[in-house]
Amino acid sequence: MRRILIPIVFVPLALAGCMLPGRKLISPYPDAPSLVDVAALTKFDGQLPLVTIPEGTQNWAPAVRYAVNAALKINPKAQFRVYVTGPAAAIPSDTELAMAKLAPEAAQVADAIAADGVAPSNVSLGAGTALAHVTAPTAPEIVVFAK
């Protein structure tokens, strides 16, 4: 009886310890968008940020490449918009200065998108504090949209 009881009790406990916590999947690129975000791009309504790059992010290239390739599989003629956005300050010039620091990096993101096989005419740059369908950021960031 004891021999049967040990496997019945301990095997399920051991297997439960091997399960992943939550519903998260382990990704080869930790900064890559989730599969839910990529699947939502099938509409290509330009309202869902494809990638959000917070200020100070060092290695954004793999996430951008992954997201662009996934978007191009859905629509080979996709158009990409790269925006620099930030919180609105009491003094507008403070907002502009904070966002201007990210402008060179936004240009690098746009160049990386073009290097991934997107026609340069399908990549645009912009800046603004209030972007439609995006919650107001707490710090300057780069947001990439696909349409």
Image (cartoon, rainbow, N blue to C red):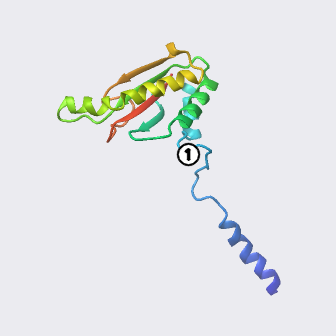
Query: Within 10 Å of the Cα at label 1, are there few (<14), some (14-19), or many (20+) other Cα atoms?
Result: few
Between 108 and 16, the residue placed more toward the observer is 108
Name the residue located 42 percent from the left edge and 28 percent from the top edge: 106
Would residue 23 be seen by someone viewing this image from the given angle?
yes
Query: Does residue 94 sit above or below 124 in this rendering?
Result: below
Residue that appears at 34% across and 38% down? 137
Q: What residue type is labelled 1?
A: Pro
Nearer-the-camera pick, 43 or 101: 101
Query: Would residue 91 be found to the left or right of residue 42 on screen?
Result: left
Asked whether, in this view, residue 89 is left or right of residue 55, the answer is left
- Residue 6 vertical placement versus 47 (above, below): below
The residue furthest left is 91
Percent position (x, y) of residue 79? 51, 19
The residue tagged with tag 1: helix, strand or loop? loop
Q: Position of residue 140 (x, y in %)?
A: 34, 36
18 w.r.t. 102: above or below: below
In the rendered image, the residue lying farthest to the top is: 121
In the rendered image, the residue lying farthest to the bottom is 2
Q: How many marks?
A: 1
Residue 123 placement, left or right of 132: right
Q: Position of residue 107 (x, y in %)?
A: 43, 24
Residue at the spot 42% in from the left edge and 31% down from the top edge = 143
The structure residue drawn at horizontal position 38% and vertical position 39%, both measured from the top left corner, is 55
Residue 44 visible somewhere in the drawing: no
The image quadrant where one finds the N terminus is bottom right
Q: Mark 1 points at which residue?
A: 30
